[in-house]
Image (cartoon, helix red, strand yellow):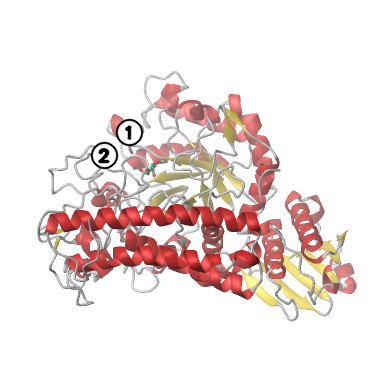
């Protein structure tokens, strides 16, 4: 086994007080014995108790409810139809010498078991435990951008552990992946890239289905539904049809047959994720059809099997002319989808990226969330740090995702934050949730940077409970992954919590984004995308920079928000400063709330960003004796890469704007 177990590392706790209660596990309920999920739950408990506490717990099964009430000792897993519980929820209650985990379904018991393990591995006492947990989001889904040749699009932690040389891979890691995912409440996963190229189109055919069924069985044992990204042009590419027009009878029949075959082989299959009419991928536009026509056609074919069709809203013109100041990529998801509100079948979900551009270090929240009212929605975030340091630089993303989830869209009077909308609370929907583009690969530590695993862990925990705080999640993760030593926990948490603001400081300023090296997106290149076709411009000149997205004089993007947001963004005086350059063209001598001019703010934040990385490194050095040597060394290496990246950003950005503006740094620091 050439990998570690991340937060399921299970470090031994020598002085744990509540051992007695954990020596016995009893499973009650008539179906429990037959369930693979419950078996897995029991094995997880036993494994964890053995490794963390040195206890070899025994396990027994009881069909009759009465028997266990009397037994009353040890951990009791019990299926019970408690209407206060969500189908995946659970409760944990200590009664005398029994620790009861109750749920309506076997999945609930699995999640309850992992909850208990999480508490124990953090050294929490079980005495008086009494809690009920229901997931806030029904769909908590990983998106992998893994290709059949084993590469991963925007992957920064090695190769795929799902595919290699056009083959499906199943090995020990497959199960450990499912364990990691289930332990944080993930209940669905899309295993292949949304850009479905070559062999991946065949994943929905007999060439791969048996092998995928094997993988799906492993996932299902951990309550995880397998989804596939599908190619909208599959009827042409593998079906021999001349078109993939969603209203064409032969196309419809082809998909029906294909989907029936998928479900014959994988009865628990979740459904498809589709990227259509986006960045060159095929879609319904070719035939003059709408996204609703395309999505509904597939949704209807999936419906008899309770399959779900997830349709991405990342649709924009990627052949833009940089001379054109009116066309605005930020507008496009809203412009493409708002008129289709209410036209999608009930098993269609629109998956919307958190911001209107593309996972920049700072973006406003996509206005589409506040616009759609009769459509199921999934929020898509990106744990893979494509634009946030590529898992070489540290960037703990949970604080960013929290801000997004807490954002009030004003779509409705009460309860329309993003968290409300994607949980289904706002419009009383049940097919909603949160997706992340994952940051995993076959590296030893799964995520390239050891500390980047906090984003993977945090995504699952946040998708389960959007009310958790970023620091709480960080503490849980550090304690389980590294150590319960308070110095380790508080120092690593401090480093994590500062990392997003730090990254933001030394990269592109005040929400303007981009300024990265084209294609691979690591490191600074201020004009890298400035004269390109991708719709990603900063519009800097000798007087100032920023994109005018106002209704009054710009692209009109600000007007896509509900009031009072639209007016707030429209006016540069009320626009949140961290997004100032996203919404406005601002002169270098404009005074910010801090009293600094824009240009001085740019200089200062870039110097500060580098100093903060230096500070992180000092803090990390202080943990040398308290951490495993390999962890310490791997992270130290990443920090040194981050430091040179941060310096490069600082010097390029500051020099660029110094040359454009001719304004000296007030503090006379070195600008080249
Ligand atoms: C999978 C960005 C990325 C692409 C990605 C695309 C998407 O453009 O750079 O690699 O493609 O987003 O989300 O579809």
Can residue 469 be seen from the camera position used here? no
Check the image and report above or below for 448 versus 284.
below
Residue at 70% x, 48% y is 221
Q: Which mark is residue 318?
A: 2
**Image x and y of residue 76, in percent:** 80, 67
Q: Is residue 42 left or right of residue 315?
A: right
Q: Which mark is residue 280?
A: 1
Q: Nearer the viewer, residue 583 or 613?
A: 613
**Image x and y of residue 563, in percent:** 24, 69
Residue at 74% x, 68% y is 101
Element assignment for label 2: loop
Can residue 320 be seen from the camera position used here? yes
Does label 1 point to a residue whose CB lies under 8 Å from ligand 1?
no
Which of the 4 quarters of the picture holds residue 561? bottom left
Marks 2,1: beta carbons within 8 A: yes
Mark positioned earlier in the residue sequence (2 or 1): 1
């Amino acid at each position: 086994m050439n990998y570690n177990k991340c937060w399921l590392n299970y470090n031994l706790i020598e002085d744990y007080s509540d051992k007695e209660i954990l020596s016995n596990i009893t499973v009650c309920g008539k179906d429990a014995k037959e369930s693979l999920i419950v078996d897995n739950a029991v094995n997880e408990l036993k494994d964890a108790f053995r490794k963390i506490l040195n206890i070899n717990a025994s396990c027994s099964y009881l069909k009759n409810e009465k028997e266990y009430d009397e037994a009353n000792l040890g951990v009791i897993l019990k299926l019970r139809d408690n209407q206060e519980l969500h189908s995946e929820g659970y409760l944990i209650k200590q009664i005398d010498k029994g620790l009861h985990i109750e749920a309506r379904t076997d999945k609930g018991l699995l999640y309850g078991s992992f909850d208990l393990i999480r508490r124990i591995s953090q050294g929490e006492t079980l005495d008086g435990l009494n809690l009920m947990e229901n997931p806030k989001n029904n769909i908590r889904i990983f998106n992998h951008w893994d290709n059949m040749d084993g590469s991963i699009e925007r992957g920064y932690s090695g190769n795929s552990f799902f595919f290699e040389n056009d083959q499906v891979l199943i090995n020990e890691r497959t199960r450990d992946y499912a364990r990691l995912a289930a332990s944080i409440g993930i209940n669905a996963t899309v295993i292949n890239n949304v850009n479905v190229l070559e062999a991946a189109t065949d994943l929905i055919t007999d060439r791969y289905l048996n092998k995928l069924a094997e993988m799906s069985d492993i996932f299902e044992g951990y309550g995880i539904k397998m989804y596939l990204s599908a190619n909208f042009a599959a009827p042409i590419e593998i079906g021999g049809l001349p078109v993939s027009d969603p209203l064409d009878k032969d196309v419809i029949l082809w998909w029906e047959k294909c989907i029936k075959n998928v479900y014959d082989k994988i009865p628990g299959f979740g459904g498809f994720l589709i990227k259509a009419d986006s960045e060159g991928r095929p879609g319904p536009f070719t035939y003059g059809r709408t996204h609703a026509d395309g999505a509904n056609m597939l949704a209807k074919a999936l419906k008899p099997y309770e399959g779900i069709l997830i349709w991405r809203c990342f649709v924009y013109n990627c052949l833009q002319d940089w001379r054109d100041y009116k066309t605005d990529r930020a507008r496009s998801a809203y412009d493409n989808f708002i008129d289709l509100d209410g036209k999608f079948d009930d098993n269609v979900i629109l998956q919307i990226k958190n911001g209107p551009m593309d996972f920049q270090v700072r973006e406003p929240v996509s206005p589409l969330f506040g616009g759609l009212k009769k459509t199921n929605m999934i929020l898509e975030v990106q744990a893979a740090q494509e634009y946030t340091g590529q898992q070489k630089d540290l960037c703990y993303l949970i604080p960013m995702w929290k801000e997004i989830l807490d954002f009030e869209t004003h779509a409705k009077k009460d309860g329309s934050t993003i968290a409300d909308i994607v949980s289904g609370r706002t419009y009383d929907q049940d097919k909603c949730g949160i997706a992340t583009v994952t940051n995993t690969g076959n590296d030893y530590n799964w995520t390239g940077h050891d500390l980047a695993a906090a984003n993977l862990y945090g995504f699952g925990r946040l998708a389960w409970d959007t009310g958790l705080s970023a620091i709480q999640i960080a503490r849980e993760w550090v304690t389980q992954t590294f150590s319960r030593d308070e110095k380790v926990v508080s120092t690593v948490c401090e480093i994590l919590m500062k990392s997003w603001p730090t990254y933001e400081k030394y990269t592109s300023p005040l929400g303007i984004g981009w300024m990265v090296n084209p294609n691979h997106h690591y490191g600074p290149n201020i004009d890298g995308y400035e004269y390109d076709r991708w719709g990603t411009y900063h519009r800097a000149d000798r007087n100032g920079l920023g994109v005018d997205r106002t209704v009054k004089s710009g692209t009109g993007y600000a007007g896509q928000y509900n009031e009072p947001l639209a007016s707030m963004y429209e006016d540069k005086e009320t626009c949140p400063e961290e997004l100032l350059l996203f919404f406005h063209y601002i002169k270098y001598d404009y005074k910010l709330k801090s009293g600094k001019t824009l240009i001085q703010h740019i200089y200062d934040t870039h110097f500060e960003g580098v100093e903060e990385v230096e500070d992180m490194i000092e803090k990390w050095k202080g943990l040398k004796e308290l951490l495993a040597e390999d962890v310490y060394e791997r992270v130290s290496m990443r920090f040194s890469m981050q430091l040179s990246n941060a310096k490069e950003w600082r010097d390029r950005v500051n020099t660029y704007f110094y040359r454009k503006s001719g304004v000296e740094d007030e503090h006379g620091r070195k600008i080249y």
